[in-house]
Amino acid sequence: MRSGEMWRLLSRFNSFRRTHVILQHLRMSKHTDAAEVLLERKGCAGVITLNRPKLLNTLTVGMIRQIYTQLKKWEQDPETFLIIIKGAGGKAFCAGGDIRAISEIGNKNQKILQDFFREEYMLNNYIASYRKPYVALIHGITMGGVSRLKKQLLKCSKGVGVSVHGQFRVATEKSLFAMPETAIGLFPDVGGGYFLPRLQGKLGYFLGLTGFRLKGRDVYTAGIATHFVDSEKLDTLEEDLSALKAPSSENVADVLETYHTKSKIDRDKSFILEEHMDKINSCFSANTVEQIIENLRQDGSSFALEQLKVINKMSPTSLKITLRQLMEGSSKTLQEVLTMEYRLSQSCMRGHDFYEGVRALLIDKDQSPKWKPADLKEVTDEDLNNHFKSLGHNDLKF
């Protein structure tokens, strides 16, 4: 056999082996699932612990399936009165999912990508409609598309999806929230099109388009969390919630409010964006990304110019998708939004910018993605409409 043929065969084998490893990662074995998410009863509470602290508790499709199945069981269990979900290790509640693995499987296996997004969005909707109190302890990182770029840590918005739709969301001084998917050719999914436009003024549009990070009490002030508790009190809070006798939502709310009221950390600190909210409401009220950019230019303040600099680095296609997603989502139900976002997810997985964003920010780390199209003017209405088109029988259905 010639050396050239041998090299091609070896290359093909390595490619097959790599794909097999990625498939295994996305499917996850039962043994690994059991270690990566802990499900236990504590008193009256069903407690979910995302147990991948070294990986900032990122979600896998196997974990999503386990959580969904257990939530179904607990909803029917007369001895389980509330759900508590938290992250192990103290560093993160959940920093997302493995974007790199998703990007590498890419077009090699669309079926897995369909299942991944479909099952996750089903879980997000189930959490929002759960019939028992659901308490998410969003201590640490709760992220969207890109975490700390300096560390090249890319995550997708899975942590947000299993927390923000719950009835109660508890932030601490160590909470960190962001949804900067536009930096990697995506959009703020897992219901971002539902909850972001419902934040005060145009705050959600600003967060979704720029990926701005909120920390500590600001996560509560912005409306992402329903309560704020000192991190050192979380264990005691969990014990008090678990010790309740046949609690109602009102009983759970009373306990959370007691802890919230006693918290003094940053109580008198003003919201980080408070002085900029007039600019945000004014500049981000436009119906096109081009007009938002023009508004920021005309404003000319250091804050506006900083946001302009950030937006100019984002995928033009993602920016236009995101603005339309938020505008349409502002008047849709959560289920309608998730159906829309499922269409968008599959379109992005078939496109160019997501894979290019991951390449530039995570794999080659040159920080210089080559977006296609590279200019907002080149993203036509037809291109945009194609992203939002129905998938027919493949649409997400509830």
Image (spheres, rainbow, N blue to C red):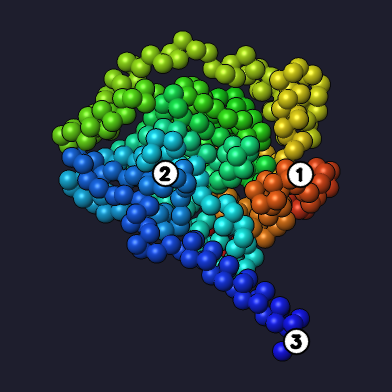
| Residue 159 point in image, percent of width and height | 47, 43
The structure residue drawn at horizontal position 51% and vertical position 26%, both measured from the top left corner, is 215
| Residue 62 point in image, percent of width and height | 41, 58
- Give how far apart the Cα atoms at labels 2 and 3 are: 48 Å
Residue 53 — which label? 2
Q: Secondary structure at mark 3?
A: loop
Label 1 or label 3, whichever lies nearer to me, is: 3
The structure residue drawn at horizontal position 29% and vertical position 49%, both measured from the top left corner, is 39
Q: Amino acid at mark 1?
A: Ser
Image quadrant assignment for residue 207: top right
The structure residue drawn at horizontal position 43% and vertical position 62%, both measured from the top left corner, is 28
Q: Is residue 315 left or right of residue 125?
A: right
Label 2 or label 3, whichever lies nearer to me, is: 3
Q: Secondary structure at mark 1?
A: loop
Q: Is residue 322 left or right of residue 192?
A: right
The structure residue drawn at horizontal position 79% and vertical position 19%, both measured from the top left corner, is 300
Image quadrant assignment for residue 211: top right
Residue position for label 1:
368
Q: Are marks 2 and 1 in contact (CB under 8 Å)?
A: no
Give the crowd class for mark 3: few <14, some 14-19, many >=20 residues within 10 Å.
few
Q: Nearer the viewer, residue 283 or 4?
A: 4
Q: Secondary structure at mark 2?
A: helix
Q: Is residue 390 visible?
A: no
Give the crowd class for mark 1: few <14, some 14-19, many >=20 residues within 10 Å.
few
Residue position for label 3:
2
